[in-house]
Image: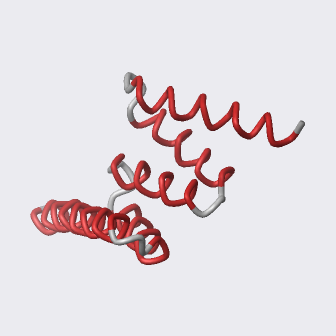
Amino acid sequence: METEAKTEENNKLLALVFSNRAMTYVKLNERAKALEDCNKSISHDPTYSKSYLRRADCLKKIGKYRDALKDYQMLRKLTPDDKAVESDMTNLEKFLERRIK
């Protein structure tokens, strides 16, 4: 039991570390490294919403809008009361609709 709790605690810490490093890479315009760290963060803690938000931002910047939309959908599940997430997701959906027409 104690080992499981420690493992969960370590995973949450690693998720935070990778997510924070991803943000640094975003600021340095190193999107591939940022995406890699977001993926690592999510693998350690799939409930850490900031990693999805950062990954969605990177994905939009490299033109992978549908993948970004999937992250926003996950974010909406994780943070249903976050109006900014809802607004970003709606804006992205509208953008994709205009691109299809």
Q: Nearer the viewer, residue 84 or 10?
A: 84
Give coordinates of residue 7: x percent, y percent: 20, 68
The C terminus: image quadrant: top right
The N terminus: image quadrant: bottom left
Image position of 51 (left or right of 71): left
- The image quarter containing residue 95 is top right
Residue at 38% over, 26% down: 82
Give coordinates of residue 64: x percent, y percent: 65, 58
Question: Does residue 35 lie above or below 68 as drawn?
Answer: below
- The image quarter containing residue 9 is bottom left
Question: Does residue 98 lie above or below 47 as drawn?
Answer: above
Residue at 79% over, 34% down: 97
Q: Furthest residue to the right?
A: 101
Give coordinates of residue 63: x percent, y percent: 65, 59
Question: Does residue 3 lie above or below 61 as drawn?
Answer: below
Give coordinates of residue 3: x percent, y percent: 14, 69
